[in-house]
Image: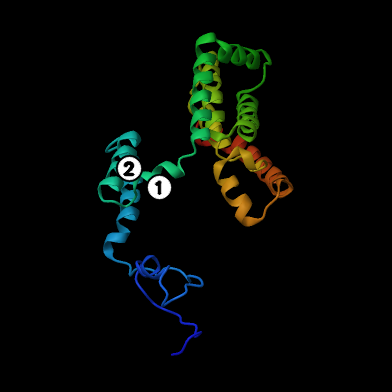
């Protein structure tokens, strides 16, 4: 070797800190860190996630108990640290969800949900049409105020309609859940849309072009199938 040679050095993590200001080396750039070998311990979060889903599904424990326990174990076993956890929390989304739950509670206590339910009943429409309208209202809310807020706002209306008609609440609540999870036309309606919008290079027009036909497909499909699978 002689002065001026360019070296590609495979080193540990402390090399840069040690030789950054050293006269023996001039660090031009770093290529990146080598991936550590995968061990059985690295599959721990995947197993924990599966248990977090399976246990509530089998009604062994509640979803709240499962989620909180999984989060606590992730910290205990150092699969995640506090700094990383704080960074990934979407605080504005949490505030919006909390606010929507408050509005939902206000709708319930003020009787607004019951008024809407009575208005739908006065239309003298069939339960199939009412269920279709509930899905449509929840879908529009989803596209405007995100899925979590839409579910919190539309659910009291669905429950009040079931009470007014004296029928099962299941088809109406299933329609609300489907509508609040199947809004594809607007990227702001769902967090995962925003996650892929930037990296994928998608535009608002792309969501409109593909999302509206998908919204219509799910709207018609659920309006026809939900009452069959969950009778009034």
Label 1: state its secondary structure: helix
The residue beneath circle 2 is 71
Which mark is drawn over residue 178?
none
| Nearer-the-camera pick, 163 or 149 | 149
Q: Residues within 10 Å of mark 1 (few under 14, many from 20)?
A: few
Image quadrant for the N terminus?
Answer: bottom left
The x, y position of residue 208, in whole percent, is 72, 44
The x, y position of residue 88, in whole percent, is 45, 44
Q: CA distance from mark 2 to mark 1?
A: 13 Å
Q: Residue furthest bottom?
A: 1
- Quadrant in the picture for residue 71: top left
In the figure, is residue 218 to the left or right of 39? right
Please say if 32 is above or below 103.
below
Q: How is the image coloured?
A: rainbow
Q: Is residue 176 at least partly visible in the picture?
A: yes
Please say if 109 is above or below 25.
above
In the figure, is residue 15 to the left or right of 182? left
- Quadrant in the picture for residue 22: bottom left
Label 2: state its secondary structure: helix
């Amino acid at each position: 070797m002689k002065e001026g040679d360019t070296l590609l050095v495979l080193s540990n993590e402390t090399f840069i800190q040690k030789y950054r200001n050293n006269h023996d080396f001039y660090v031009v750039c770093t290529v990146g860190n080598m991936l550590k070998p995968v061990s059985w311990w690295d599959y721990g979060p995947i197993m924990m996630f599966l248990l977090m889903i399976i246990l509530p599904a089998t009604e062994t424990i509640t979803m709240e108990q499962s989620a909180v326990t999984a989060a606590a174990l992730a910290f205990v076993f150092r699969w995640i640290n506090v700094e990383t956890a704080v960074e990934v929390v979407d605080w504005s989304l949490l505030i919006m969800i909390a606010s929507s739950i408050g509005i939902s509670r206000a709708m319930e206590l003020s009787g607004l949900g019951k008024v809407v339910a009575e208005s739908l009943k006065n239309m003298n429409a069939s339960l199939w049409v009412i269920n279709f309208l509930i899905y449509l209202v929840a879908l529009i809310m989803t596209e405007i105020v995100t899925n979590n807020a839409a579910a919190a706002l539309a659910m009291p209306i669905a429950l009040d309609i079931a009470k007014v008609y004296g029928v099962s609440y299941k088809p109406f609540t299933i329609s609300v859940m489907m509508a609040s999870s199947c809004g594809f036309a607007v990227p702001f309606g769902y967090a995962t849309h925003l996650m892929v919008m930037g990296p994928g290079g998608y535009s608002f027009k792309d969501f409109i072009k593909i999302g509206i036909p998908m919204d219509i497909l799910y709207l018609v499909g659920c309006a026809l199938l939900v009452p069959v699978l969950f009778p009034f």
